[in-house]
Amino acid sequence: MGKTKNLGTRGMTKEIKKYLPFYMFLLPALILVILFCYMPMEGLAIAFKDYKMARGIEGSDWAGLKHFRALFSDPNFYRVLGNTLKISITTLLTTFPVTIIFTILVNEINRKRFKSVVQTVTYMPHFLSWVVVGTFVYQLLSPTGGVVNAALIKMGILDKPLYFMAQKDMFLPIYLITNLWKTTGYSIVIYLATIAGIDTSLYEAASIDGANRFHRILHITLPAMFPTMCTMLILNIGSLISVGFDPVFNLYNDATYQTADVISTYVYRKGMVESRYDFSTAIGLFQNVVSLALVLIANWFARKANPEYKII
């Protein structure tokens, strides 16, 4: 038995030496995860304390569930929670299918040079800061000199300029369109990588059997993409309660506050503006627990639907 254990240890050592360069590439990412994801978990104790910066985490008095009771008794929390779910669910229902469709369209481009141009052009917005994007959207939709207002007036759709960014009902469409423009090009990368791994002989055999392009997409491309689609869907479901801070903060204003205010901006106000670090930590902990539960539930449903599929 000791000999078997010794052989196992030797085999593991041999494998580590064999793939050592790959482990070295992984090391920086692993260090970053430990530093910025695991080490700060000690700060979660703030959610259960009356945190005083001068006294530190250890010196602050325990408060139990005080901040959670305050959170669930705050009417504003239910408003921002509703806004968060509305924006995130609508975003998921639009971006997920659009990303799949756009991936297939890009993949079906036969000219490699044109395909590269399309990928590059749609990929570039991902690298723009949300501050830049927000400023661009405000200028584009401005009632004084905005291109959209000028075009709509010229076509006779509007009689006078409309300040779109000040309309409560317009925030969600503006957010969705802007988010699609900025993220779709980047989101298709992982799907294109999945498609690149499909055996080309499958397409050749299907063509010989008389399958047209649509049939090849339906019976070869989409089934090959399905495991990746499930994984991405589960991860997206996990973030249903976490609308990004940057896009909302750079697109909303006082006029759209009631419909655009989400949990991330609520946390920002409570933590950074009002300096209620313990309360904002409680909100963040609640958010993370719900996100974890959503991921586990979505993964359970995926495994029930397809027993061979497994992510967790």
Image (spheres, rainbow, N blue to C red):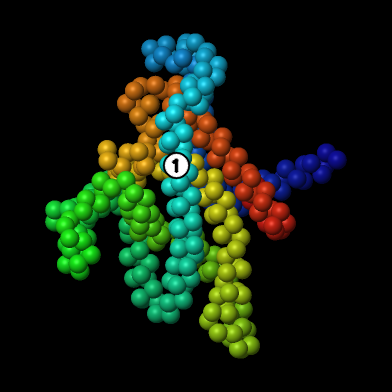
Is residue 29 among the parts visible in the rendering? no
Q: Quadrant of residue 227?
A: bottom right
> What residue is shown at x 55% (from left), y 19% (from top)?
65
User: Residue 108 in the image: x percent, y percent?
Assistant: 46, 76
User: Residue 222 in the image: x percent, y percent?
Assistant: 57, 69
User: Residue 54 in the image: x percent, y percent?
Assistant: 38, 12
* Amino acid found under the numbered disc labelled 1: Thr
User: Residue 259 in the image: x percent, y percent?
Assistant: 37, 42
Give 259 or 308, whichever is nearer the viewer: 259
Q: Which residue is mark 1?
A: 84
Judge whether 2 appears above or below 45 on screen: below
> What residue is shown at x 44% (from left), y 42% (from top)?
84
> What residue is shown at x 45% (from left), y 21% (from top)?
278
Q: Is residue 133 left or right of residue 48?
A: left
> What residue is shown at x 27% (from left), y 38% (from top)?
254
Q: Is residue 287 left or right of residue 211?
A: left
Determine the residue located farthest toward the front in the rendered image: 159
Label 1 packing within 10 angstroms: few (<14), some (14-19), many (20+): many
Q: Quadrant of residue 238?
A: top right
Judge whether 69 appears above or below 206 on screen: above
Give 199 or 184, whichever is nearer the viewer: 184
